[in-house]
Image (tube, coloured by chain):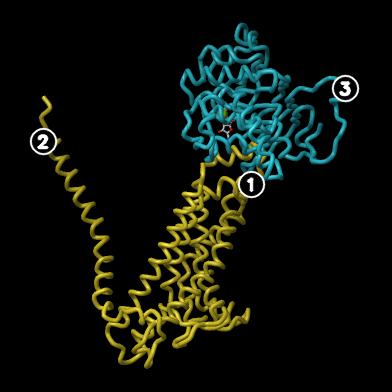
Chain colours: A yellow, B cyan
Protein backbone atom coordinates (compact mmCIF):
# COMPACT_ATOMS: atom_id res chain seq x y z
CA UNK A 1 0.00 0.00 0.00
CA UNK A 2 2.78 2.42 0.89
CA UNK A 3 5.32 1.15 -1.67
CA UNK A 4 7.35 3.72 -3.58
CA UNK A 5 6.42 4.36 -7.17
CA UNK A 6 8.95 5.00 -9.90
CA UNK A 7 8.29 8.72 -9.52
CA UNK A 8 8.92 8.57 -5.77
CA UNK A 9 12.20 6.81 -6.35
CA UNK A 10 13.25 9.30 -8.95
CA UNK A 11 12.47 12.22 -6.65
CA UNK A 12 14.35 10.55 -3.83
CA UNK A 13 17.41 10.19 -6.07
CA UNK A 14 17.23 13.87 -7.04
CA UNK A 15 16.84 14.77 -3.39
CA UNK A 16 19.98 12.87 -2.45
CA UNK A 17 21.89 14.23 -5.43
CA UNK A 18 21.01 17.81 -4.53
CA UNK A 19 21.93 17.35 -0.90
CA UNK A 20 25.33 15.97 -1.86
CA UNK A 21 25.90 18.74 -4.40
CA UNK A 22 25.12 21.49 -1.90
CA UNK A 23 27.26 19.84 0.74
CA UNK A 24 30.10 19.62 -1.78
CA UNK A 25 29.85 23.32 -2.62
CA UNK A 26 29.84 24.19 1.06
CA UNK A 27 32.91 22.08 1.73
CA UNK A 28 34.66 23.69 -1.22
CA UNK A 29 34.38 27.00 0.61
CA UNK A 30 36.67 25.66 3.27
CA UNK A 31 39.31 24.50 0.84
CA UNK A 32 40.76 27.91 -0.11
CA UNK A 33 40.77 29.01 3.51
CA UNK A 34 42.64 25.90 4.60
CA UNK A 35 45.02 26.15 1.66
CA UNK A 36 45.87 29.77 2.34
CA UNK A 37 46.43 29.14 6.03
CA UNK A 38 48.30 25.92 5.34
CA UNK A 39 50.72 27.50 2.89
CA UNK A 40 51.28 30.51 5.14
CA UNK A 41 51.97 28.38 8.18
CA UNK A 42 54.11 25.92 6.29
CA UNK A 43 56.31 28.56 4.72
CA UNK A 44 56.16 31.28 7.36
CA UNK A 45 56.47 29.31 10.56
CA UNK A 46 60.28 29.03 10.48
CA UNK A 47 60.58 32.81 10.57
CA UNK A 48 58.09 33.29 13.38
CA UNK A 49 59.34 33.99 16.86
CA UNK A 50 58.68 36.33 19.74
CA UNK A 51 61.52 38.53 18.50
CA UNK A 52 59.84 38.69 15.10
CA UNK A 53 56.90 40.45 16.71
CA UNK A 54 58.86 42.68 19.08
CA UNK A 55 61.90 43.84 17.15
CA UNK A 56 62.46 46.40 14.44
CA UNK A 57 63.42 45.33 10.92
CA UNK A 58 67.18 45.04 10.38
CA UNK A 59 69.66 44.85 7.51
CA UNK A 60 67.53 46.47 4.83
CA UNK A 61 64.44 44.68 6.11
CA UNK A 62 65.89 41.26 5.38
CA UNK A 63 66.16 40.38 9.05
CA UNK A 64 64.71 41.40 12.40
CA UNK A 65 61.05 41.86 13.24
CA UNK A 66 57.97 43.79 12.33
CA UNK A 67 57.21 45.58 15.58
CA UNK A 68 56.83 49.13 14.12
CA UNK A 69 54.61 47.83 11.32
CA UNK A 70 52.46 45.88 13.74
CA UNK A 71 51.93 48.86 16.02
CA UNK A 72 51.44 51.13 13.02
CA UNK A 73 48.66 48.97 11.65
CA UNK A 74 46.93 48.87 15.02
CA UNK A 75 47.19 52.66 15.29
CA UNK A 76 45.91 53.23 11.76
CA UNK A 77 42.91 50.99 12.31
CA UNK A 78 42.03 52.43 15.72
CA UNK A 79 42.19 56.03 14.54
CA UNK A 80 40.17 55.10 11.44
CA UNK A 81 37.54 53.47 13.68
CA UNK A 82 37.42 56.50 15.96
CA UNK A 83 36.62 58.62 12.93
CA UNK A 84 34.28 56.38 10.97
CA UNK A 85 32.18 54.70 13.65
CA UNK A 86 30.68 57.82 15.27
CA UNK A 87 30.06 59.48 11.91
CA UNK A 88 28.74 56.32 10.28
CA UNK A 89 26.46 55.34 13.14
CA UNK A 90 25.09 58.88 13.47
CA UNK A 91 24.41 59.07 9.74
CA UNK A 92 22.73 55.67 9.80
CA UNK A 93 20.56 56.69 12.76
CA UNK A 94 19.50 59.78 10.88
CA UNK A 95 18.75 57.86 7.69
CA UNK A 96 16.85 55.10 9.43
CA UNK A 97 15.06 56.94 12.23
CA UNK A 98 14.66 60.57 11.26
CA UNK A 99 14.97 61.12 7.52
CA UNK A 100 11.71 61.75 5.68
CA UNK A 101 11.44 59.94 2.37
CA UNK A 102 12.40 62.87 0.15
CA UNK A 103 14.58 63.21 -2.94
CA UNK A 104 17.41 64.42 -0.74
CA UNK A 105 17.33 61.26 1.37
CA UNK A 106 17.24 59.13 -1.74
CA UNK A 107 20.18 61.07 -3.14
CA UNK A 108 22.18 60.47 0.02
CA UNK A 109 21.40 56.76 -0.09
CA UNK A 110 22.51 56.65 -3.72
CA UNK A 111 25.71 58.47 -2.80
CA UNK A 112 26.46 55.93 -0.09
CA UNK A 113 26.04 53.02 -2.47
CA UNK A 114 28.32 54.67 -5.00
CA UNK A 115 30.90 55.55 -2.38
CA UNK A 116 31.05 51.86 -1.49
CA UNK A 117 31.94 51.09 -5.08
CA UNK A 118 34.85 53.52 -5.40
CA UNK A 119 38.16 51.63 -5.85
CA UNK A 120 40.61 52.04 -2.99
CA UNK A 121 43.28 53.63 -5.18
CA UNK A 122 40.83 56.44 -5.93
CA UNK A 123 40.29 56.89 -2.21
CA UNK A 124 44.06 57.10 -1.90
CA UNK A 125 44.22 59.98 -4.38
CA UNK A 126 41.33 61.67 -2.62
CA UNK A 127 43.17 61.25 0.69
CA UNK A 128 46.28 62.88 -0.71
CA UNK A 129 44.29 65.81 -2.06
CA UNK A 130 42.05 66.30 0.93
CA UNK A 131 43.87 65.26 4.08
CA UNK A 132 47.54 65.41 3.17
CA UNK A 133 47.40 68.65 1.20
CA UNK A 134 44.21 70.62 1.71
CA UNK A 135 43.89 70.08 5.46
CA UNK A 136 47.67 70.10 5.78
CA UNK A 137 48.00 66.96 7.86
CA UNK A 138 50.96 65.91 5.70
CA UNK A 139 51.70 62.24 5.22
CA UNK A 140 50.71 61.07 8.66
CA UNK A 141 48.73 58.51 10.60
CA UNK A 142 45.90 61.03 10.76
CA UNK A 143 45.71 61.50 6.99
CA UNK A 144 46.00 57.77 6.32
CA UNK A 145 43.41 56.85 8.93
CA UNK A 146 40.95 59.45 7.70
CA UNK A 147 41.37 58.07 4.18
CA UNK A 148 40.64 54.59 5.50
CA UNK A 149 37.68 56.00 7.42
CA UNK A 150 36.15 57.58 4.33
CA UNK A 151 36.65 54.35 2.45
CA UNK A 152 34.93 52.21 5.06
CA UNK A 153 32.20 54.68 5.99
CA UNK A 154 29.65 53.23 3.56
CA UNK A 155 30.07 49.77 5.08
CA UNK A 156 29.45 51.13 8.55
CA UNK A 157 26.46 53.19 7.45
CA UNK A 158 24.78 50.43 5.47
CA UNK A 159 25.27 47.71 8.07
CA UNK A 160 24.16 50.01 10.90
CA UNK A 161 21.12 51.15 8.95
CA UNK A 162 20.12 47.58 8.24
CA UNK A 163 20.51 46.58 11.90
CA UNK A 164 18.38 49.54 12.95
CA UNK A 165 15.72 48.66 10.41
CA UNK A 166 15.63 45.11 11.72
CA UNK A 167 14.28 46.40 15.04
CA UNK A 168 10.51 45.88 14.81
CA UNK A 169 8.49 49.02 14.13
CA UNK A 170 6.03 47.98 16.86
CA UNK A 171 8.60 48.82 19.50
CA UNK A 172 8.90 52.33 18.16
CA UNK A 173 5.14 52.79 18.02
CA UNK A 174 4.80 51.55 21.58
CA UNK A 175 7.32 54.16 22.70
CA UNK A 176 5.89 57.01 20.65
CA UNK A 177 2.37 56.46 21.90
CA UNK A 178 3.72 56.68 25.44
CA UNK A 179 5.05 60.11 24.57
CA UNK A 180 8.67 59.14 24.06
CA UNK A 181 10.65 61.38 21.74
CA UNK A 182 12.47 59.84 18.83
CA UNK A 183 15.75 60.08 20.69
CA UNK A 184 14.37 58.44 23.84
CA UNK A 185 13.04 55.64 21.66
CA UNK A 186 16.36 55.23 19.88
CA UNK A 187 18.45 55.35 23.03
CA UNK A 188 16.34 53.10 25.21
CA UNK A 189 14.95 50.59 22.74
CA UNK A 190 16.30 50.75 19.20
CA UNK A 191 20.05 50.96 19.82
CA UNK A 192 20.22 48.27 22.52
CA UNK A 193 18.48 45.90 20.13
CA UNK A 194 20.61 46.82 17.13
CA UNK A 195 23.99 46.93 18.82
CA UNK A 196 25.16 43.45 17.91
CA UNK A 197 24.33 44.04 14.25
CA UNK A 198 26.16 47.33 14.35
CA UNK A 199 29.24 45.69 15.84
CA UNK A 200 29.17 43.03 13.15
CA UNK A 201 29.48 45.84 10.62
CA UNK A 202 32.39 47.28 12.53
CA UNK A 203 34.12 43.89 12.57
CA UNK A 204 33.78 43.70 8.80
CA UNK A 205 35.25 47.15 8.54
CA UNK A 206 38.22 46.26 10.73
CA UNK A 207 39.04 43.19 8.69
CA UNK A 208 38.98 45.19 5.53
CA UNK A 209 40.95 48.11 6.89
CA UNK A 210 43.80 46.04 8.27
CA UNK A 211 44.69 44.65 4.88
CA UNK A 212 44.32 47.80 2.78
CA UNK A 213 47.52 49.02 1.18
CA UNK A 214 46.71 51.52 -1.53
CA UNK A 215 44.88 54.12 0.60
CA UNK A 216 47.70 54.36 3.13
CA UNK A 217 50.77 54.19 0.97
CA UNK A 218 50.53 57.79 -0.28
CA UNK A 219 48.92 59.23 2.81
CA UNK A 220 50.86 58.08 5.84
CA UNK A 221 52.49 54.67 5.67
CA UNK A 222 56.26 54.69 5.43
CA UNK A 223 58.52 52.39 3.48
CA UNK A 224 60.98 51.98 6.34
CA UNK A 225 60.83 53.71 9.73
CA UNK A 226 62.42 51.64 12.45
CA UNK A 227 60.84 53.40 15.44
CA UNK A 228 57.36 54.02 16.75
CA UNK A 229 55.33 57.11 15.84
CA UNK A 230 54.97 59.66 18.63
CA UNK A 231 51.70 61.27 17.55
CA UNK A 232 49.04 61.00 14.87
CA UNK A 233 50.97 63.55 12.83
CA UNK A 234 53.89 61.16 12.35
CA UNK A 235 54.28 58.62 9.60
CA UNK A 236 54.31 54.99 10.48
CA UNK A 237 55.09 51.60 9.03
CA UNK A 238 52.16 49.33 8.36
CA UNK A 239 52.02 45.58 7.89
CA UNK A 240 50.21 45.56 4.59
CA UNK A 241 52.66 47.97 2.99
CA UNK A 242 55.59 46.20 4.65
CA UNK A 243 54.46 42.94 3.11
CA UNK A 244 54.20 44.58 -0.29
CA UNK A 245 57.64 46.15 0.07
CA UNK A 246 59.55 43.08 1.18
CA UNK A 247 57.82 40.89 -1.41
CA UNK A 248 58.51 43.13 -4.35
CA UNK A 249 60.94 45.94 -3.63
CA UNK A 250 63.73 44.56 -1.46
CA UNK A 251 66.39 42.16 -2.76
CA UNK A 252 67.66 39.12 -0.86
CA UNK A 253 64.72 38.72 1.49
CA UNK A 254 64.62 35.20 2.96
CA UNK A 255 61.72 33.25 1.51
CA UNK A 256 59.99 32.69 4.83
CA UNK A 257 59.81 36.36 5.80
CA UNK A 258 56.90 37.54 3.62
CA UNK A 259 54.87 34.51 4.64
CA UNK A 260 55.51 35.23 8.26
CA UNK A 261 54.39 38.85 7.79
CA UNK A 262 51.22 37.65 6.03
CA UNK A 263 50.54 35.26 8.87
CA UNK A 264 50.93 38.05 11.39
CA UNK A 265 48.60 40.25 9.32
CA UNK A 266 45.92 37.58 9.41
CA UNK A 267 46.50 37.11 13.11
CA UNK A 268 45.89 40.82 13.71
CA UNK A 269 42.56 40.56 11.85
CA UNK A 270 41.59 37.54 13.91
CA UNK A 271 42.55 39.17 17.20
CA UNK A 272 40.60 42.32 16.38
CA UNK A 273 37.59 40.26 15.34
CA UNK A 274 37.80 38.23 18.50
CA UNK A 275 37.91 41.42 20.55
CA UNK A 276 34.77 42.78 18.85
CA UNK A 277 32.98 39.48 19.29
CA UNK A 278 33.87 39.39 22.97
CA UNK A 279 32.62 42.95 23.32
CA UNK A 280 29.39 41.91 21.64
CA UNK A 281 28.94 38.97 23.96
CA UNK A 282 29.48 41.19 27.00
CA UNK A 283 26.90 43.66 25.71
CA UNK A 284 24.41 40.89 25.16
CA UNK A 285 24.95 39.45 28.57
CA UNK A 286 24.55 42.84 30.21
CA UNK A 287 21.20 43.35 28.50
CA UNK A 288 18.68 42.68 31.25
CA UNK A 289 15.27 42.23 29.74
CA UNK B 1 -5.94 72.07 31.76
CA UNK B 2 -4.03 72.48 28.55
CA UNK B 3 -1.64 70.50 26.41
CA UNK B 4 0.72 73.43 26.14
CA UNK B 5 3.83 72.77 28.15
CA UNK B 6 3.96 75.87 30.26
CA UNK B 7 0.93 78.06 29.90
CA UNK B 8 -2.40 77.53 31.61
CA UNK B 9 -5.27 78.74 29.54
CA UNK B 10 -8.95 79.08 30.29
CA UNK B 11 -10.67 77.27 27.54
CA UNK B 12 -14.23 76.14 27.15
CA UNK B 13 -14.07 73.77 30.09
CA UNK B 14 -14.39 76.41 32.78
CA UNK B 15 -16.15 79.00 30.68
CA UNK B 16 -19.03 76.93 29.42
CA UNK B 17 -19.51 75.17 32.73
CA UNK B 18 -20.03 71.79 31.10
CA UNK B 19 -17.36 69.17 30.54
CA UNK B 20 -16.49 68.79 26.88
CA UNK B 21 -16.44 65.29 25.38
CA UNK B 22 -13.28 63.21 25.55
CA UNK B 23 -12.86 63.32 21.79
CA UNK B 24 -14.68 65.43 19.23
CA UNK B 25 -13.90 65.54 15.54
CA UNK B 26 -15.22 68.26 13.29
CA UNK B 27 -15.23 67.48 9.57
CA UNK B 28 -12.03 65.50 9.85
CA UNK B 29 -10.40 64.50 6.55
CA UNK B 30 -7.17 62.62 6.13
CA UNK B 31 -5.12 61.74 3.07
CA UNK B 32 -2.27 59.26 2.73
CA UNK B 33 -0.71 60.86 -0.33
CA UNK B 34 -3.58 60.96 -2.80
CA UNK B 35 -5.67 58.38 -1.02
CA UNK B 36 -8.37 59.79 1.22
CA UNK B 37 -8.67 57.52 4.26
CA UNK B 38 -11.03 59.67 6.35
CA UNK B 39 -13.91 61.67 4.91
CA UNK B 40 -15.69 64.32 6.95
CA UNK B 41 -15.65 62.30 10.13
CA UNK B 42 -17.85 63.81 12.84
CA UNK B 43 -17.88 61.93 16.07
CA UNK B 44 -18.13 62.75 19.76
CA UNK B 45 -16.86 60.34 22.36
CA UNK B 46 -18.35 61.00 25.82
CA UNK B 47 -16.12 60.84 28.85
CA UNK B 48 -15.86 57.81 31.04
CA UNK B 49 -17.71 55.45 28.74
CA UNK B 50 -16.78 52.69 26.33
CA UNK B 51 -17.28 53.55 22.70
CA UNK B 52 -16.99 50.89 20.04
CA UNK B 53 -15.95 51.25 16.46
CA UNK B 54 -16.80 48.64 13.86
CA UNK B 55 -16.45 48.37 10.13
CA UNK B 56 -14.76 46.25 7.48
CA UNK B 57 -10.98 46.14 7.10
CA UNK B 58 -9.49 49.22 5.50
CA UNK B 59 -12.39 51.55 6.36
CA UNK B 60 -10.18 53.85 8.41
CA UNK B 61 -10.73 52.76 12.01
CA UNK B 62 -7.05 52.53 12.88
CA UNK B 63 -6.37 55.74 11.04
CA UNK B 64 -8.96 57.60 13.10
CA UNK B 65 -7.50 56.22 16.33
CA UNK B 66 -4.02 57.21 15.27
CA UNK B 67 -5.23 60.74 14.56
CA UNK B 68 -6.20 61.21 18.18
CA UNK B 69 -2.58 60.98 19.34
CA UNK B 70 -1.32 62.50 16.08
CA UNK B 71 0.90 59.46 15.73
CA UNK B 72 -0.45 59.09 12.20
CA UNK B 73 1.76 61.98 11.10
CA UNK B 74 4.83 59.85 11.66
CA UNK B 75 4.17 58.26 8.28
CA UNK B 76 5.28 60.56 5.50
CA UNK B 77 2.81 62.20 3.13
CA UNK B 78 -0.11 62.48 5.54
CA UNK B 79 -2.36 65.53 5.30
CA UNK B 80 -5.32 66.32 7.52
CA UNK B 81 -8.01 69.00 7.45
CA UNK B 82 -10.78 69.69 9.90
CA UNK B 83 -10.74 69.78 13.65
CA UNK B 84 -10.01 67.33 16.40
CA UNK B 85 -10.49 68.18 20.05
CA UNK B 86 -9.30 66.04 22.90
CA UNK B 87 -10.73 66.85 26.34
CA UNK B 88 -11.94 70.13 24.91
CA UNK B 89 -8.64 71.24 23.39
CA UNK B 90 -7.83 71.56 19.72
CA UNK B 91 -4.91 69.21 19.24
CA UNK B 92 -3.89 70.90 16.00
CA UNK B 93 -3.36 74.20 17.80
CA UNK B 94 0.21 75.45 17.35
CA UNK B 95 1.05 75.39 21.07
CA UNK B 96 0.14 71.73 21.54
CA UNK B 97 3.00 69.67 22.90
CA UNK B 98 2.59 66.19 21.49
CA UNK B 99 4.33 64.60 24.44
CA UNK B 100 1.67 66.04 26.75
CA UNK B 101 -1.11 64.91 24.40
CA UNK B 102 0.28 61.38 24.25
CA UNK B 103 0.55 61.20 28.01
CA UNK B 104 -3.19 61.80 28.24
CA UNK B 105 -4.13 59.43 25.42
CA UNK B 106 -2.84 55.87 25.62
CA UNK B 107 -2.98 53.33 22.83
CA UNK B 108 -3.18 49.54 22.72
CA UNK B 109 -2.44 47.68 19.53
CA UNK B 110 -3.82 44.67 17.75
CA UNK B 111 -0.75 42.57 18.34
CA UNK B 112 0.53 42.86 21.89
CA UNK B 113 3.78 44.80 21.62
CA UNK B 114 5.59 44.65 24.94
CA UNK B 115 8.98 46.33 24.78
CA UNK B 116 12.06 44.09 24.86
CA UNK B 117 12.54 44.87 28.54
CA UNK B 118 11.61 43.26 31.84
CA UNK B 119 8.01 43.28 33.04
CA UNK B 120 8.96 45.94 35.56
CA UNK B 121 10.64 48.19 33.01
CA UNK B 122 7.75 47.83 30.60
CA UNK B 123 5.31 49.15 33.15
CA UNK B 124 7.66 51.90 34.29
CA UNK B 125 8.82 52.91 30.81
CA UNK B 126 6.40 55.81 30.53
CA UNK B 127 7.27 56.97 34.01
CA UNK B 128 10.98 56.75 33.21
CA UNK B 129 10.81 58.87 30.09
CA UNK B 130 8.64 61.54 31.69
CA UNK B 131 10.61 62.09 34.88
CA UNK B 132 13.95 63.78 35.21
CA UNK B 133 15.23 62.24 38.42
CA UNK B 134 16.54 58.78 37.74
CA UNK B 135 17.61 58.07 41.29
CA UNK B 136 15.49 57.99 44.40
CA UNK B 137 11.74 57.65 44.48
CA UNK B 138 12.14 53.91 44.51
CA UNK B 139 9.12 53.47 46.72
CA UNK B 140 7.10 55.60 44.35
CA UNK B 141 8.11 53.48 41.38
CA UNK B 142 7.30 50.29 43.22
CA UNK B 143 3.91 51.70 44.13
CA UNK B 144 3.20 52.74 40.51
CA UNK B 145 4.27 49.33 39.33
CA UNK B 146 2.08 47.46 41.74
CA UNK B 147 -1.01 49.58 41.27
CA UNK B 148 -0.76 49.42 37.46
CA UNK B 149 -0.34 45.66 37.48
CA UNK B 150 -3.16 45.26 40.01
CA UNK B 151 -5.45 47.39 37.87
CA UNK B 152 -4.99 45.03 34.93
CA UNK B 153 -5.31 41.96 37.17
CA UNK B 154 -1.78 40.81 36.48
CA UNK B 155 -0.08 41.49 39.80
CA UNK B 156 -0.67 38.13 41.44
CA UNK B 157 0.59 36.31 38.39
CA UNK B 158 3.81 38.21 37.88
CA UNK B 159 4.72 39.64 41.28
CA UNK B 160 7.42 37.01 41.77
CA UNK B 161 9.05 37.50 38.39
CA UNK B 162 8.96 41.21 37.76
CA UNK B 163 12.42 41.09 36.21
CA UNK B 164 11.57 38.34 33.75
CA UNK B 165 11.35 39.22 30.09
CA UNK B 166 7.97 40.56 29.07
CA UNK B 167 7.95 38.69 25.76
CA UNK B 168 7.92 35.39 27.64
CA UNK B 169 4.40 36.09 28.95
CA UNK B 170 1.39 34.59 27.23
CA UNK B 171 -0.33 36.78 24.63
CA UNK B 172 -3.17 37.58 26.99
CA UNK B 173 -0.74 38.59 29.72
CA UNK B 174 1.26 40.61 27.22
CA UNK B 175 -1.82 42.53 26.21
CA UNK B 176 -2.66 43.19 29.84
CA UNK B 177 0.89 44.39 30.32
CA UNK B 178 0.52 46.73 27.35
CA UNK B 179 -2.52 48.23 29.05
CA UNK B 180 -0.74 48.39 32.40
CA UNK B 181 2.14 50.20 30.73
CA UNK B 182 -0.16 53.12 29.92
CA UNK B 183 -1.45 53.66 33.43
CA UNK B 184 1.58 55.13 35.29
CA UNK B 185 1.54 58.21 33.04
CA UNK B 186 -2.08 58.79 34.09
CA UNK B 187 -3.95 58.89 30.80
CA UNK B 188 -7.61 59.93 30.53
CA UNK B 189 -8.33 58.18 27.27
CA UNK B 190 -7.42 54.66 26.20
CA UNK B 191 -7.56 53.85 22.49
CA UNK B 192 -7.70 50.16 21.73
CA UNK B 193 -7.19 48.91 18.20
CA UNK B 194 -8.64 45.39 18.02
CA UNK B 195 -7.02 44.48 21.33
CA UNK B 196 -8.38 40.93 21.36
CA UNK B 197 -7.91 39.84 17.78
CA UNK B 198 -4.64 38.03 18.50
CA UNK B 199 -6.11 36.23 21.51
CA UNK B 200 -8.04 33.01 22.05
CA UNK B 201 -11.60 33.11 23.45
CA UNK B 202 -10.44 32.88 27.07
CA UNK B 203 -7.95 35.69 26.54
CA UNK B 204 -10.62 37.74 24.81
CA UNK B 205 -12.97 37.26 27.74
CA UNK B 206 -10.24 38.26 30.20
CA UNK B 207 -9.37 41.43 28.30
CA UNK B 208 -13.04 42.30 27.90
CA UNK B 209 -13.54 41.92 31.61
CA UNK B 210 -10.53 44.13 32.19
CA UNK B 211 -11.79 46.79 29.82
CA UNK B 212 -15.14 46.77 31.55
CA UNK B 213 -13.45 47.24 34.92
CA UNK B 214 -11.53 50.27 33.61
CA UNK B 215 -14.74 51.92 32.47
CA UNK B 216 -15.56 55.16 34.24
CA UNK B 217 -12.01 55.88 35.27
CA UNK B 218 -10.91 56.08 31.66
CA UNK B 219 -12.65 56.95 28.45
CA UNK B 220 -12.25 53.94 26.20
CA UNK B 221 -12.50 53.87 22.43
CA UNK B 222 -12.24 50.33 21.13
CA UNK B 223 -12.08 49.03 17.58
CA UNK B 224 -13.34 45.51 17.14
CA UNK B 225 -14.10 43.04 14.39
CA UNK B 226 -16.13 40.98 16.77
CA UNK B 227 -19.81 41.91 16.62
CA UNK B 228 -20.59 40.03 19.81
CA UNK B 229 -17.89 41.96 21.56
CA UNK B 230 -19.09 45.30 20.25
CA UNK B 231 -22.55 44.42 21.46
CA UNK B 232 -21.48 43.15 24.88
CA UNK B 233 -18.76 45.57 25.79
CA UNK B 234 -19.68 49.00 24.42
CA UNK B 235 -22.17 51.67 25.30
CA UNK B 236 -22.23 53.50 22.03
CA UNK B 237 -20.95 52.33 18.72
CA UNK B 238 -19.83 53.83 15.43
CA UNK B 239 -20.00 52.01 12.13
CA UNK B 240 -17.46 53.13 9.56
CA UNK B 241 -17.30 52.36 5.88
CA UNK B 242 -14.90 53.68 3.29
CA UNK B 243 -13.54 56.44 5.51
CA UNK B 244 -16.90 57.81 6.65
CA UNK B 245 -18.91 57.26 9.79
CA UNK B 246 -22.13 55.79 8.50
CA UNK B 247 -23.89 55.49 11.80
CA UNK B 248 -23.18 56.42 15.38
CA UNK B 249 -25.64 55.63 18.13
CA UNK B 250 -26.31 53.78 21.36
CA UNK B 251 -25.10 50.22 21.00
CA UNK B 252 -28.51 48.66 21.73
CA UNK B 253 -30.11 50.89 19.15
CA UNK B 254 -27.53 50.10 16.50
CA UNK B 255 -27.78 46.37 16.96
CA UNK B 256 -31.54 46.24 17.46
CA UNK B 257 -32.62 48.62 14.75
CA UNK B 258 -29.78 50.02 12.67
CA UNK B 259 -30.76 53.20 10.84
CA UNK B 260 -28.77 52.54 7.68
CA UNK B 261 -29.13 49.47 5.51
CA UNK B 262 -25.36 49.23 5.14
CA UNK B 263 -25.01 48.99 8.91
CA UNK B 264 -27.56 46.20 9.07
CA UNK B 265 -25.81 44.33 6.29
CA UNK B 266 -22.48 44.58 8.04
CA UNK B 267 -23.81 43.56 11.44
CA UNK B 268 -25.49 40.55 9.94
CA UNK B 269 -22.24 39.56 8.30
CA UNK B 270 -23.20 40.18 4.72
CA UNK B 271 -19.84 41.79 4.10
CA UNK B 272 -16.74 42.44 6.12
N1 LIG C 1 0.63 54.39 5.83
C1 LIG C 1 -0.32 54.30 4.92
N2 LIG C 1 -0.08 54.73 3.66
C2 LIG C 1 -1.04 54.63 2.71
N3 LIG C 1 -2.27 54.14 2.91
C3 LIG C 1 -2.57 53.68 4.13
C4 LIG C 1 -1.61 53.74 5.21
N4 LIG C 1 -2.18 53.23 6.31
C5 LIG C 1 -3.43 52.89 5.95
N5 LIG C 1 -3.68 53.16 4.65
C6 LIG C 1 -4.92 52.93 3.92
O1 LIG C 1 -5.92 53.64 4.60
C7 LIG C 1 -7.10 52.87 4.66
C8 LIG C 1 -7.56 52.76 6.09
O2 LIG C 1 -6.63 51.99 6.80
P1 LIG C 1 -6.85 51.60 8.31
O3 LIG C 1 -7.16 52.84 9.07
O4 LIG C 1 -5.69 50.81 8.75
O5 LIG C 1 -8.15 50.68 8.23
P2 LIG C 1 -8.78 49.72 9.32
O6 LIG C 1 -8.06 49.89 10.61
O7 LIG C 1 -10.21 50.13 9.39
O8 LIG C 1 -8.66 48.33 8.79
C9 LIG C 1 -6.80 51.53 4.03
O9 LIG C 1 -7.34 51.53 2.73
C10 LIG C 1 -5.31 51.48 3.98
O10 LIG C 1 -4.88 50.79 2.82
MG1 LIG D 1 -6.91 48.48 11.66
**Mark 1–mark 2 contact, CB under 8 Å?**
no
SS at circle 2: helix
Residue B198 can be seen in this image = yes
| Viewer-side residue, A158 vs B175 | B175
- Left or right of B119, for residue B127: right
Tell how many labels. 3
Q: Nearer the viewer, mark 1 or mark 2?
A: 1
Residue corresponding to mark 1: A184
- On the image, the x and y values in percent for residue A86 come to 58, 62
Sequence-earlier tag: 1 or 2: 2
Image vertical order of residue B154 relative to residue A130, above or below: above
- Left or right of B82, for residue A282: left
Q: CA distance from mark 2 to mark 3?
A: 87 Å
- Left or right of B241, for residue A218: left
Residue corresponding to mark 3: B16
For the N terminus of chain B, give its image quadrant.
top right
- On the image, the x and y values in percent for residue A119 come to 45, 71
Q: Is mark 3 within 8 Å of ligand 1?
A: no
Image vertical order of residue A94 relative to residue A171, above or below: below
Q: Same chain for marks 1 and 3?
A: no
Q: Chain of mark 2?
A: A
- Left or right of A217, for residue B102: right
Q: Residue at 71% of width from left, 39% of height from top?
A: B99
Q: Residue at 41% of width from left, 77% of height from top?
A: A240
Q: Residue at 48% of width from left, 69% of height from top?
A: A118
> In which image quadrant can residue B224 be found?
top right
Q: Which mark is residue A6?
A: 2
> In which image quadrant can residue B210 be found?
top right
Amino acid sequence: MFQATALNRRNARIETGMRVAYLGMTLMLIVPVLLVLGVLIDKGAPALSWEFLTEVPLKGMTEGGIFPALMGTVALVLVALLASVPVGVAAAIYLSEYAPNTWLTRLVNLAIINLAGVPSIVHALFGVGAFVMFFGFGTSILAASLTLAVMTLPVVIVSTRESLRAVPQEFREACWTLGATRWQTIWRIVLPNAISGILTGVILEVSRTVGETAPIMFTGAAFFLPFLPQSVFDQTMAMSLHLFVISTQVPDVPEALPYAVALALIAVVLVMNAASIAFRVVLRRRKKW
Amino acid sequence: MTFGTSRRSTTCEGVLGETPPAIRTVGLNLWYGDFQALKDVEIEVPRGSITGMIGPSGCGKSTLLRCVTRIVERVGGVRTTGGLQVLGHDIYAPDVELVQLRKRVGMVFQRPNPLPLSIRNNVLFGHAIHTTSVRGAKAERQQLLESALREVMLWDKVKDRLDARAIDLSLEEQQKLCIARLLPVKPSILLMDEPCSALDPDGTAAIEQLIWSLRGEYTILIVTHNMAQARRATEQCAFMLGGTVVEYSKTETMFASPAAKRTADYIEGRYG
